[in-house]
Image (tube, rainbow, N blue to C red):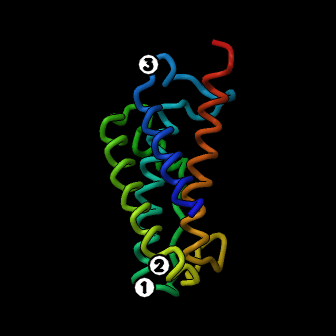
């Protein structure tokens, strides 16, 4: 399954970013955007939220699942100060669980529906696919940050 490959590849690429030097972690891909450190903490939080959503969709389909405001989380949880070792461990554990759940339920229950509070009707497959897409999008931002002039 391509999804499992994508989830595994983006997991491994993201985990490697947690070991970047401090100077690189402070870089950003554009003025006013999050630093690599903030992106990594966000990825850990988003992975936790997505993991919980996926579990809900498997166990209790057809419910409303609320969005979260990533910018409020970044500010309120002080992403610039949050310990990266905790975020790395959260990201790894949640991603490994998502990979397990995707392998077990993507095809079998993929049509399970839910209502996202902002985007409307979605399926379990949509949410699994979002995990890989979301992670790749942020990896692309990290790549741009690392390739920009120092």
**Nearest to N terminus: mark 3 or mark 1:** 3
- Residue farthest along the top direction in this orientation: 150
**Which residue in the structure is indicated by mark 1?**
60
Task: Give the numbered dot on residue 21.
Answer: 3
- In the image, is residue 130 above or below residue 56? above
Q: Which of 13 and 112 lies nearest the eye of the viewer?
A: 13
Alpha-carbon span between mark 2 and mark 1: 5 Å
- Disc 2 residue crowd, few under 14, some 14–19, many 20+, Cα 10 Å: many
Badge 2 marks a residue whose secondary structure is helix
Residue denoted by label 2: 57
Pointer 2 with pointer 1, Cβ within 8 A? yes
Question: Percent from the top left, x then y, of residue 56?
Answer: 42, 77
Q: Secondary structure under badge 3?
A: loop
Image quadrant where one finds the N terminus: bottom right
Residue 104 in the image: state x and y as whole percent: 42, 73
Q: Is mark 1 on a helix, strand or loop?
A: loop
The residue at the point 44 percent across, 19 percent down is: 21
**Other-residue count near label 1 (Cα within 10 Å), few / some / many at <14 / 14–19 / ≥20:** few
Whole-angstrom CA distance, mark 3 to mark 2, is 38 Å
């Amino acid at each position: 399954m391509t999804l499992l490959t994508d989830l595994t590849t983006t997991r491994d690429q993201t985990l490697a970013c947690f070991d970047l030097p401090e100077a690189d972690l402070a870089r950003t891909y554009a003025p006013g955007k999050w630093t690599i450190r903030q992106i990594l903490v966000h990825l850990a939080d988003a992975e936790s939220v997505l993991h919980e959503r996926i579990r809900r969709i498997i166990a209790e389909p057809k419910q409303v699942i609320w969005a979260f405001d990533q910018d409020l989380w970044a500010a309120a949880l002080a992403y610039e100060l949050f310990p990266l070792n905790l975020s790395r461990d959260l990201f790894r554990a949640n991603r490994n669980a998502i990979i397990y759940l995707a392998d077990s339920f993507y095809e079998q229950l993929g049509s399970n529906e839910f209502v996202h509070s902002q985007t409307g009707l979605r399926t379990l497959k949509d949410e699994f696919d979002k995990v890989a897409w979301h992670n790749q999008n942020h990896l692309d931002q990290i790549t741009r940050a690392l390739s920009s002039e120092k």
